[in-house]
Image (spheres, rainbow, N blue to C red):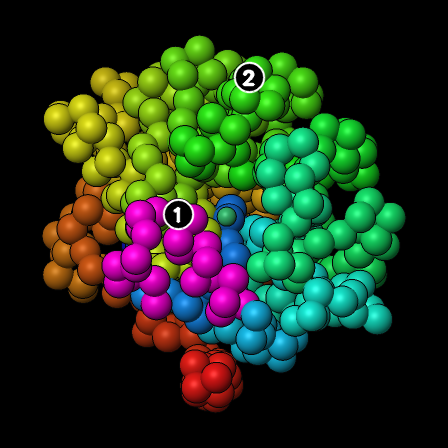
Amino acid sequence: MTALWLKAALLPSGWQNDVRIEISGTLISAVIVGTPARPEDERADIGVPGLCNVHSHAFQRGMAGLAEHRGPSDDDFWSWREVMYRFLDRLDPDDVEAIAAMAYIEMLETGYTRVGEFHYLHNDPDGKRYQDPAEMAARVIGASEATGIGMTLLPVFYAHSDFGGAPPKHGQRRFLNDLDAFARLLGACEDILPTDGILGVAPHSLRAVTVEELRELVDMRRGAPLHIHAAEQLKEVEASLAFTGARPVEWLLANAGVDQHWCLIHATHLTEAETDALAASGAVAGLCPVTEANLGDGIFPAVRYLAAGGKISTGTDSNILIDPAQELRALEYSQRLSHRARNLLASEARPSVGRRIFDEAHAGGAQALGVTQGLAVGMSADLVVLDAKHPALYGRSGDQLLDSWIFAARANCVDAVWRAGRKLVSNGQHKDRENVWRRYKAVLDRILAL
Ligand code: ZN
């Protein structure tokens, strides 16, 4: 048994002082409030629960920053996607594992304790299937086991380049499956899932699957997390209207049985009616504000959606930058810029913006990744220790700590991270950072020289 004593901790009941958290194996076995530290306790200042990163394409971390110069055509999501296709042409399974491990270390070091890996790189560089259908999935699982981050694996079904079953393009050959091959992939993933790993399913988007395929995919893992990209770009909304007569989210809500197991990634372009209906569905909106800003996607209507009781979570998506505080900051700032007002994702009852969006992202993230979480007995011991001596946090208490972490600090507020009972990050650094960095560096040296 390990015991961690905290001056202050954010428990399900709110902020509490002098908190002793006992950890047995991977789980929290006791939480005692208002108690002095014992000599054997590890002491820390401020403890908050770890966050779920609901949407990651880990391999894209290796190309972060390489698509930030202006190209010959209109520079939007679609030109970024061309750079991404060229980058992934070069990656073998070892490369993907090395890049994913580096990304997962950055996630842990910034306060994420579980990742939803939206995994769509299945085939070899020629587009041929590997002998083991889970060859690539095993690599992202391997990276999660090597770094210790919790894994909700979301194998992606991708078969078409546009609505109506349009044939796939050359750049998409590494993603493709048919339903039989995909069922084999899910079976193979089940066999290699880590102890507290969760296996969901991810129809890529309404562009990449037909209506019939979507129906079968929903049936393949009923009750498990189901993630889908929806309404990220206006071009997709227009194509959906042209093909189905409905907008993507409108169509999903009317036809696909969207419920609390679903996570709609982005859901950027919503009418007011769609916003309210999505909020009422019980599904989670998987927002990726940093990537959405980077790609020029648009702004999610978070004020209306939260007022309607909608559930949100955040993800790092393209991994252009990995940091939950920056995602939450970008989420609030996008609302401020579009509404020309301040403190929008708060309410009279919940006046701290930082606390409100942290709580929403924590609860929605856990729901979207199929886990229950928090600093309570029986939960996985996933805990983030903030550094009370960081200039941005000094002299703060309670919700001010979250407001200052999210809005006033650069990246180095996280002092330590515990995940499934193990202390993986100390003094802001993951214990295996050096090894993972060396391997990552060797991969980048090689593929960037190609
Ligand atoms: Zn994505």
Residue matched to label 2: 246
Q: Residue at x 76, y 67 (%)?
A: 128
Task: Identify which amino acid the numbered label 2 is placed on.
Answer: Ala
Work out which quarter of the rendered image holds the N terminus and state it: bottom right
Task: Identify which amino acid the numbered label 1 is placed on.
Answer: Phe
Is residue 70 rendered magenta in the image?
yes
Q: Is residue 437 left or right of residue 222?
A: left
Q: Examine the rendered structure and indicate whether residue 88 appears above or below residue 264.
A: below
Q: Residue at x 62, y 15 (%)?
A: 254
Ranked by sequence position, the earlier of labels 1 and 2 is: 1
Q: Residue at x 27, y 43 (%)?
A: 330
Count of numbered tags: 2
Q: For residue 220, which numbered disc appears in the image?
A: none
Is residue 301 rendered magenta in the image?
no
In this orientation, does residue 238 appear? Answer: yes
Q: Where is residue 46, by image quadrant?
A: bottom left
Residue matched to label 1: 77
Q: Position of residue 316 (x, y in %)?
A: 42, 52
213, 226: nearer the viewer: 213
Q: Residues within 10 Å of mark 2 (few under 14, many from 20)?
A: some
Instruction: Quote the CA–CA distance across marks 1 and 2.
Output: 22 Å
Q: Examine the rendered structure and indicate whether residue 345 appears above or below residue 151.
A: above
Q: Position of residue 446 (x, y in %)?
A: 48, 87
Q: Which residues are magenta?
A: 66-88
Q: Secondary structure at mark 1?
A: helix
